[in-house]
Amino acid sequence: MRLRWVLLSLVACCLIPVPAFSSDDRDGIGVHLMRPDSLAGWDYGPGRPSGWMIAGGTLRGSGSSTPLLSGFTFGDFQLQFGWGVEAGAAWDVLLPEVPSGPGLRLRLCEGEHCGQLDDADKTLAPGSPVAAISSGLHRARLDRAGNRLTLSVDDRQLWQVPVAPGRRFGLGLAVTGGEARLADLRVQEPPGEPIGNGKDLTGWWTPGDIKAWGVENGQIVLRKENGNYLRSEKEYANYTLSLEYKIQKGGNSGIGIRTPRPAWPSGDGMEIQIWDIPYDHKPLDKHAPGAIYGNVPPLARADKTGQYNRMVIKADGWMISVWMNGQLIQQCNTGDHPELKNRNLKGWIGIQDHGARIDVRDMRVLEAPPGLGLDAWQKPRPPCGARLVVDRLMNSERLSVPDGARSGVVTARVEGKKAEGHVLADLPGPGAVVCLARSSDDGRLAFYFDGEQSPRLECKPADLWQVAPQLSEDPKPVLTYLAYRKGLRIVLRDAARGNWRIDYLTFPTNIPVDSYTAGDPYAPRGWLAAALYRHEQFGWGVHREFEPRPRMTAGPKTIQPGKRERMIQVDGAGIVHWVKLTADKRVLDNNDLWLEVRTDGRKEPAVATPVRFWFPGLAGNGNYPNFVMVDRNGATNMLAMPFGAGIELTLANRGSKPIRGVGTIVSPELATEQTRGDIQGRMRLRAVFEPAGQDANHLASCRGRGRWVGLVCEQPKGTPLRIESLAVDGQAVESWSDWSLDTFLGHNGDFRSCLSGRHGPLAWRYLLAQPVDFQQSFELTPRGPTRGGRLAVFYVGR
């Protein structure tokens, strides 16, 4: 009786018509969900995809292939694709429940029970016979409209079943049995609601000149410059945005998404780049059309010059996907991106004025329920060496977590030419070179990976910063990520002089490392681009001013001589991600104003230093490209401060005159029930200043377990500083003996670079990419007594 009732229900449902979806006449139904040559956007399952081959737009797999999970979810949709199987094989189209749960499983096979639909352990439709075909592919169409789900195969409706209208599904694929093929996988969603009324700019605003924008024949147009970003009054979180645009030849623009009202997309939200530029002129970099501007290069290009282009943007939790003229050109899990994971998940939608006329029509938004999509998307991604290095640079809280990577240094002095060249380093793997410093550009570098007889990379020293994987645009020292699995031999040929210092990491066995190959640094897509863009942005004074974390502000206050003012106190556990000082910049010219930080209820400060040592390089000349300091409405230090039982920031006046108008701003991330244990167990930031003449026989020292991550020192004129030795856990470390300060910094003269510099009386170096770990003790000793103050920075165990 139960089966009879189900069959009668299905027949009744078949009598209900399915509403038609709109289609794009030029590109068929909807957008392609797969690239023709890669599995981009389909690698969110429990492991890396294996057993699949995709070429010419056809996906091939078998029962031994790993299940695929996409980065897309849908409410109402129309899914179409071609499929084929050998005898005994079947496709499983997986529709997991959002946010979690098995959801639906649709089985497609030849013979009996094609189209069987299961909801967890319940069969909703038993399927029908489908005859085998000798060539070509079957066509399947799956329609979801409100409370109905309909399947058609080869233009024959097999069933229609009810589904709860509030359910939302992801999309996955799997094969059982033998080999199977799938092609032309497309989806169409309902078009959504228009943004604006098509007559005027009601519903839009801009901090620029609103008259630069207008509506002509139902299209939004940029008529002249100074329009800034045209921004929607309404803010959106999860949605599918569709539009058509035409931009003048050579023009530049962008579509801003998820940006807070007063903010700018490339720094505080996201911008999908629009740029009319010849295909052979611009590489697929972080500024190419379809890029998440500055941070993630596109997968491909599909824009057409001088024509209307149809763009679809899907923002779904942390997932951002972009289609151009039906082709998938961008797909990124921004929650797994070193920069974009710090961005907002809601904000305005906008069109950029970059000086070029742009016409936008049929702009619609299909809003989706709030949330982060599938829980499976939130699982940690597989580790790799590049992730570790870039995360250290861009999110210094990662330095407070032991990760097993160990830093090392080799130095070489070149004197006189040798026919076979000078071997600068011969490093065992697995590892990566992260920094190369030199005193001369003589000769030519050759990099031999994994015991190979021919170099994979060869260049002049002055060109290394451009040809090796870039983490910054500094030509000297070069910050890079040159990974090797078995080993790396670096040879300098045709050089008669020069001093070299090479910093490297050795990775533990649980961190996979693939050796460098030209054009493929084996880093997650967008990670190196994000580091490079951060380096650039800090040089411009650009800093996230509207990130989703809360702000705590204190001041301005006047601090009398000899007095302290408690500025900020945070209870509980958390991480202060950066500290900003708002004050007259002349406080960075002397040692009168001090910053003191106490954590976990301790009386002794974990950080106690004159503020000019905490913000080196920002006095006088302001910003410079780097990873630690930025002056944006105040001097800002990006070294994170974890705390487990409260944190307190105090400013102290140790001078003889009042200091007026000083304040602080911090960005705290408060622990949740899920993160409290992790944060409480982290190492704490420690930075204690030693003035000139105090403990003059060492530069930096620490007892216990920790990591050395930086040194700021004062070098009075006429007193050159040299490093005599480094001892870790009581043992001298090779290659750290008898260094000049220039060797340590990687440059001579006055300069400010990504992680080191010398400006005025101060010199500094941060070892974010290659901190020095110790278990019992750390001692950095100078040659002869020091004559200036110095600040050593550590993350130390509790």
Image (cartoon, rainbow, N blue to C red):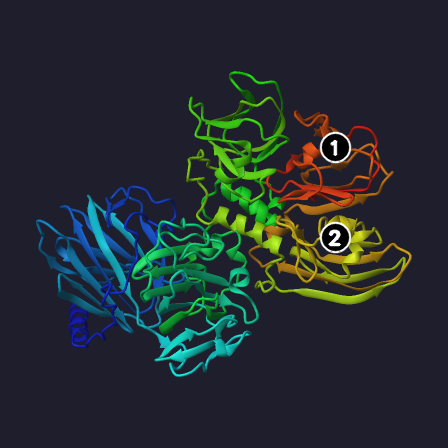
Q: For the view shown, which residue lies furthest in the top direction?
A: 419
Horizontal arrangement in the rendering, residue 597 relative to residue 131 (left or right): right
Q: Residue 306 carries which label?
A: none
Report the front residue among 126 and 532: 532
Q: Quarter-wise, where is residue 245 in the image? A: bottom left
How far across and down, in percent of the image, does residue 184 sit?
23, 56
Q: Is residue 398 visible?
A: yes
**Vertical placement of 15 versus 152: above or below?**
below
Task: Give the residue number, with chain letter if any, for mark 2.
Answer: 619
Alpha carbon separation for disc pair 2 and 1: 29 Å
Amino acid type of the residue that numbered disc 1 sits on in the rendered structure? Glu
Residue ID at (18%, 71%): 10
Horizontal arrangement in the rendering, residue 376 relative to residue 772 (left or right): left
Q: What element carries label 2?
A: loop
**Vertical placement of 371 versus 795: above or below?**
below
Report the front residue among 666 and 590: 590
Residue ID at (62%, 42%): 768
Other-residue count near label 1 (Cα within 10 Å), few / some / many at <14 / 14–19 / ≥20: some
How far across and down, in percent of the image, does residue 556 sit?
77, 67
Residue ID at (54%, 58%): 342
Report the front residue among 634 and 554: 634
- Which of the image's four quarters has the N terminus? bottom left
Task: Give the residue number, with chain letter if any, for mark 1.
Answer: 779
In this rendering, the label closer to the viewer, 2 or 1: 2
Amino acid type of the residue that numbered disc 2 sits on in the rendered structure? Ala
- Which of the image's four quarters has the C terminus? top right
